[in-house]
Image (cartoon, rainbow, N blue to C red):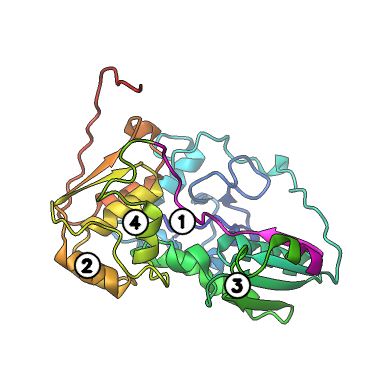
Amino acid sequence: MPFAITNSCCTDAACVRVCPVGCIHPAPGEPGFGTSEILHIDPASCIDCGACADACPVGAIFPVDRLGAHDAIYADINAAYYSGSSGSSGSDEARPDPSRAAAPQRRHIADELDVAVVGTGPAGMYTVNELLARTEARITLIDEHLTPGGLVRSGVAPDHPHTKQIERAFALALRHPRVEFVGGVRLGRDVTLAELGEQFAAVFLATGADAARRLGIDGEDAPRVTSALDVVRWSGGVPGFDTSPLPEANLGRAVVVGTGNVALDLARLLTLSPDELGRTDVADRTLDWLRAHRLDDVVLLGRGDAAHAAYTEAEFRALDRIPGLTVRLVVLTGDVDQS
């Protein structure tokens, strides 16, 4: 029975490297790698060895006959990727041709250097893994928090536990003898970039978004308006974000401006029942607040239609399968005054 890759795929290609028959695509160097929502296993050439499932850092790979009702669609999505039918993951990239795959070009970093990586989220830790694999450099990891993890720890939606399993792969790097973690140090407050440049041969910045993006529109600072970043920090248990950024007014409706994956994460957070949320690792403070302030209606407000929305198919499926939730698509037509 072949295996299939499901929506929690992190696309880091660990599965590609261990597959003995090369049946997982797009692989590094192939069209679509780095942009595809998930990787895909060819059911026609899969030999059912399970090496990919063992190597997957986020537990996204299962035998097709063990997929639950919610994930059964991924057997079709994996197969459709190779048939070129419309049931694929939505990628319009050319189908893989391994014989034409070009080896990725990488810059060489001299050995036995002291380097710093600022930020311990996915970008920072993937950088560390590359440095450990390709150099003998000594690495100092710097983070403003006392615990590493970045977005994996505090930014991944609480009902996506499989995605957070990537921390297991990062934990090996954190224990490496050439890696030192320094927490509680904020760039620009405790140390400057110039000072790091004087101490290290190379400095890699992987800090992510430190502040919410401003839209520059009227009403942005009005009461009951908050940023998704503050909500994610609050629900993810980030220290210093103990007070709910959501308004106390219990009006029963919330409007989320945007249709990307974070917007859908917020929609699920606001519509999942407290019992469902209680089975996740959502912060206790958030769960207590949501028990007292339940919403009946969440509006995702986007500029275009669903076909041009920024969310991935996997994230929409996670929203669409919430028990008791009805998803309605409303498209407003006509001219809109953008003055």
Circle 4 residues within 10 Å: few <14, some 14–19, many ≥20: some
Give the quadrant of the N terminus: bottom left
Q: Which is closer to the viewer, label 3 or label 1?
A: 3
Q: Specify start and end residues of the magenta stretch as a single range.
A: 197-216
The disc labelled 3 sits on which kind of residue? Val
Of the pair 40 and 285, the residue shown nearer to us: 285
Q: Which is closer to the viewer, label 3 or label 4?
A: 3
Residue 5, disc: 1
Circle 3 residues within 10 Å: few <14, some 14–19, many ≥20: some
User: Which numbered disc flags the more N-terminal residue, 3 or 1?
Assistant: 1
Residue drawn 25% across the image and 51% down it: 224
The disc labelled 1 sits on which kind of residue? Ile
Residues tagged 4 and 1 counted as in contact (Cβ below 8 A): no
Circle 2 residues within 10 Å: few <14, some 14–19, many ≥20: some
On the question of residue 76 being in view, the answer is no
Residues tagged 2 and 1 counted as in contact (Cβ below 8 A): no
Of the pair 187 and 64, the residue shown nearer to us: 187
Q: Quadrant of residue 124?
A: bottom right
The disc labelled 2 sits on which kind of residue? Trp
Find residue 288 and report its horizontal and vertical position in percent: 22, 71
Look at mark 2 in the image and give the residue it sits on: 289
Look at mark 4 in the image and give the residue it sits on: 71
Find residue 251 and report its horizontal and vertical position in percent: 13, 51
Find residue 211 and report its horizontal and vertical position in percent: 48, 54
Q: Is residue 159 above or below residue 38?
A: below
User: Which numbered disc flags the more N-terminal residue, 2 or 3?
Assistant: 3
On the question of residue 293 being in view, the answer is yes
Question: In whole angstroms, how far apart are the C-alphas of marks 3 and 4?
Answer: 41 Å
Task: Provide the secondary structure element on which disc 3 rests.
Answer: loop
